[in-house]
Image (tube, rainbow, N blue to C red):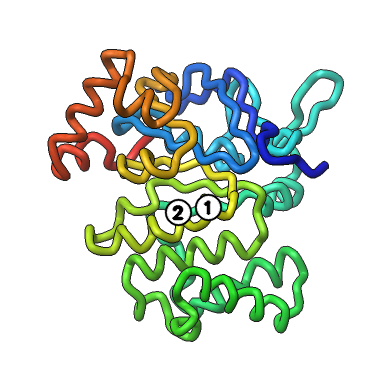
Amino acid sequence: MVLQRGEPLVVAHNVHKRFGSNEVLKGISLSVSVGEVVCLLGPSGSGKSTFLRCINHLEKVDAGSIEVGGRFVGYERRSNELIELPRRKIAQQRANIGMVFQQFNLFPHLTALENVTLAPTRVKGLSRVAAEAAGRELLQRMGLVDKADAYPAQLSGGQQQRVAIARALAMSPELMLFDEPTSALDPELVGEVLAAMRQLAREGMTMVVVTHEMQFAREVADVVIFMDGGVIVEMGTPAEVLDAAKEDRTRAFLSRVRRGPSDQTVETGGDA
């Protein structure tokens, strides 16, 4: 089933997740439409990254459900019960969901091009020639075609993160997840990664982004969601949430973030 722009791609219903006695997600429900960019904001420990990892079943939900493209991620329904799929089938589902982490997670012994082409050849069965041609095109889109033969240790942090984005795109995902993709970068390198993400948004890629980059959220997001304590506190357009927040918790968070980079790091560095 091919969804059209504006139709719901991600549907989360009453998602709960706990780690031991710590309930990190307390009933998250939201919908992300095809072509939409959703930015998740909130203090450390609010559950943003955990929810992102639940979308592609890197974390199992304890209650509720998440569907991507009309399919339960990691599960299938049998007699009104959700049964977890075998690992191989879960991996096939994940192939449609790209994810970019805080740390770049590149294979250090592989070149940039080899990092980008590894999954398409092993998972999708592309020939090496086809995968390399597509990989070079993706690196060109990321402004890195001249770094195809460089190893991660020879690249800056911003370059490594753009290779990571190209690697995720190499699987032709229907959805891209970004977990604070600039938080591990030096400030002068942040802009090049955000520029690549802006271009993806212009191209119509559906994106869910955990970020502390308020200007990026203001310029690129269709929907901004503020989370705190494992719940969605406020949701709306960037103007509604960032400029005219209704909830005291949202306003308090935004006021701390706006004080400067040091406060921003304290408020958003890491997550449950």
Q: Which mark is residue 260?
A: none
Q: Residue at x 44, y 37 (%)?
A: 39
Which quadrant holds the N terminus? top right
Q: Which mark is residue 202?
A: 1
Distance between mark 1 and mark 2 Cα atoms? 6 Å
Q: Which mark is residue 198?
A: 2
Question: Which of the 4 quarters of the picture holds residue 146?
Answer: bottom left
Instruction: Note whether residue 186 is visible.
Output: yes
10 lies left or right of 181 = right
State yes or no: discs 1 and 2 in contact (Cβ < 8 Å).
Answer: yes
Q: Residue at x 37, y 28 (%)?
A: 239
Residue 100 placed where, x, y %? 48, 54
Q: Secondary structure at mark 2?
A: helix
124 lies left or right of 55 = right
Q: Is residue 271 above or below residue 242?
A: below
Instruction: Note whether residue 21 is visible.
Output: no
Question: Which of the 4 quarters of the picture holds residue 185?
Answer: bottom left
Q: Residue at x 72, y 64 (%)?
A: 123
Instruction: Classify mark 2: residues with Cα within 10 Å, few (<14), some (14-19) or many (20+).
Output: some
Q: Is residue 105 above or below residue 46?
A: below
Residue 107 placed where, x, y %? 48, 70
Which quadrant holds the C terminus? top left
